[in-house]
Amino acid sequence: MTATTDGQRLYAIGDIHGRSDLLSAMLARIRGDLAARPHPAPRLIFLGDYVDRGPDSRGVIETLIAVQASEMPATFILGNHDSYIEEYFRDPEWYDRSIHWLNPRMGGNTTLASYGVPDASEHDPTATMEAFRAAFPAEHMAFLDGCDLQQQIGSYLFVHAGIRPGVRLDRQLREDLIWIREPFLSSTRDFGVKVVHGHTIVETPEHHPNRIAIDTGAYASNLLTCLLLEDSTVAILSEDGPAPLPPGAGLPEPAQPAARNGLRDLFRRS
């Protein structure tokens, strides 16, 4: 498959999780790259999970809204964590996984705190719902409501979590697009596109034959990853400029499956 980005230079940013400081630094890095290497058709792509866990979810959304209003073309993908805000307003007691959104492992409590609603707890999720509803700007909800579930550009498909192998791209379910791990992560199938995704934390960006994983756990690692794609160019935008990410980069050694699985288990509810 010949790599193409339809004549655009794409900057795909992994899961931010409330780290407005890292987001602002990355946007400055992108502006610097464009100043040093101008391109007529740049585009930013954000892969979702803007909120939770980090200290400033509100600041992240405000920054992304400012990007949306700027002249820079941008695509915003919905992450599973972002989807929980609307669900919390609909029914604060509801959750669809083994732990509630306000549990510190999910990190919804930090999102409420960033909007001035402290001490949110899974033990009494109803207690803070109305205060959060009053504090959460309509503009912020409109931003989340407008996020895409997937975006194909050239030979790349951008999505938060992944896709269901064997299902056509136009038949993918929302649940899979924002939540899937297996059988996506272990699939060696040719998807017809190379999938660029976050959701599952990796120690370093992984360039598989059929996908590129760029969630490097920014909220805990202090490492927010930006993947740069420009037709056949695949690189990570480092402080020193683009650093090539060739096929096979970041993949664990075959003799180390236990370590890899241990990392995935550790962050299985990311």
Image: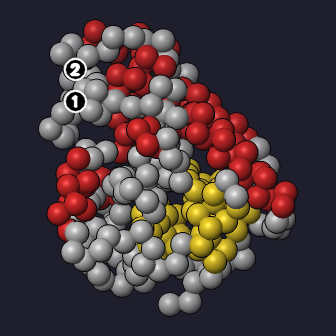
The scheme the figure's colours follow is secondary structure
Verify CB contact (< 8 Å) between mark 2 and mark 1: yes
How many other residues sit within 10 Å of disc 1, few (<14), some (14-19) or many (≥20)? many
Where does the C terminus fall, quadrant-wise? top left
Amino acid on which disc 1 is placed:
His
Please say if 165 is above or below 227: below
Residue at 78%, 53% (x, y): give it.
32
Q: Earlier in the sequence, mark 2 or mark 1?
A: 1
Amino acid on which disc 2 is placed:
Glu
Q: Position of residue 176 (x, y in %)?
A: 29, 58
Classify mark 2: helix, strand or loop: loop
Q: Position of residue 17 (x, y in %)?
A: 45, 38
Say whether residue 116 is left or right of residue 265: right
The answer, for residue 124, to whether it is visible in the render is yes
Question: Foreground residue, 123 or 261?
Answer: 261
Classify mark 1: helix, strand or loop: loop
Q: CA–CA distance between discs 2 and 1?
A: 6 Å
* Marker disc for residue 231: none
Q: Residue furthest bottom?
A: 1
Question: Foreground residue, 87 or 219?
Answer: 219
Q: Which residue is mark 1?
A: 100
Q: Position of residue 96 (x, y in %)?
A: 20, 39
**Quarter location, residue 124:** top left
Residue at 48%, 12% (x, y): give it.
116
Please say if 161 is above or below 110: below
Q: Which residue is mark 2?
A: 122
